[in-house]
Image (spheres, rainbow, N blue to C red):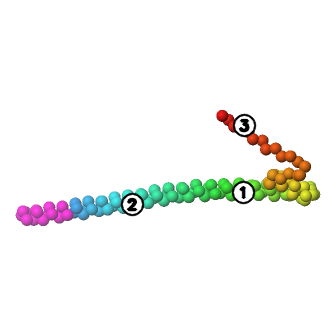
Amino acid sequence: MSLKHRSEEALKAHDNKKRYGLVRFLATLALAVMAVYVAYTIISDNIAIRENQKRYDELVAQTHEVLENNEQINAYLENEANLDDYIENMAREKLDYANSNELIYNVIPASAE
């Protein structure tokens, strides 16, 4: 083999190593980008799930309140209670109203010092 032939083979081998190194670098970079994307997606989805879970819990609580109010109204209707009694109870419970001859006391707990 001639010296020229060996140097050509050495250059080809060196070029192959460069290409392999470049391909390896690009593959590693692509994997890193995909890993960052997957991590970002998982984190953002978890945040959205937590927010939606809170909203769901709030809606379930509101639903229970409405069902309790419906039960109370149905109880008044089933017992043939007077509509005025229902209105009076709602005014007392929800609006903190009282009759003109009643006194209302607000109890304020002692502050802890």
| Residue furthest top in the image | 113
Q: How much space separates mark 3 and mark 1, taking CA atoms?
A: 33 Å
Magenta span main SS: helix
Q: Quadrant of residue 63?
A: bottom right
CB atoms of marks 2 and 3 within 8 Å: no
- Does residue 14 belong to the magenta stretch? yes
Residue 76 image label: none
Q: Which residue is mark 3?
A: 110
Residue 13, position as x, y percentages in the image: 18, 61
The picture places residue 15, in percent across and down from the top left corner, at 20, 64
Q: Amino acid at mark 2?
A: Val
Which of marks 1 and 3 precedes in the sequence? 1
Element at badge 1?
A: helix
Mark pair 2, 3: CA separation: 60 Å
For residue 62, the mark is 1
Residue at image position (12%, 65%) is: 8
Q: Secondary structure at mark 2?
A: helix
Magenta residue check for 43: no
What SS does tag 3 mark?
loop
Q: Bin the neighbour count of mark 3 within 10 Å (Cα to Cα): few under 14, some 14-19, many 20 and up.
A: few
Residue 84 or residue 73, whichever sits in front: 84
Q: Quadrant of residue 78?
A: bottom right
Q: Tell me which residue sits at (62%, 55%) in the image.
A: 53
Magenta span: 1-15
Mark closer to the observer (3, 1) = 3
| Quadrant housing the C terminus | top right
Question: Where does label 2 land, which residue?
Answer: 33
Give me the residue at 17% from left, 64% from top: 12
- Residue 78, can we see it? no
* Residue 103 at x, y percent in the picture: 86, 46
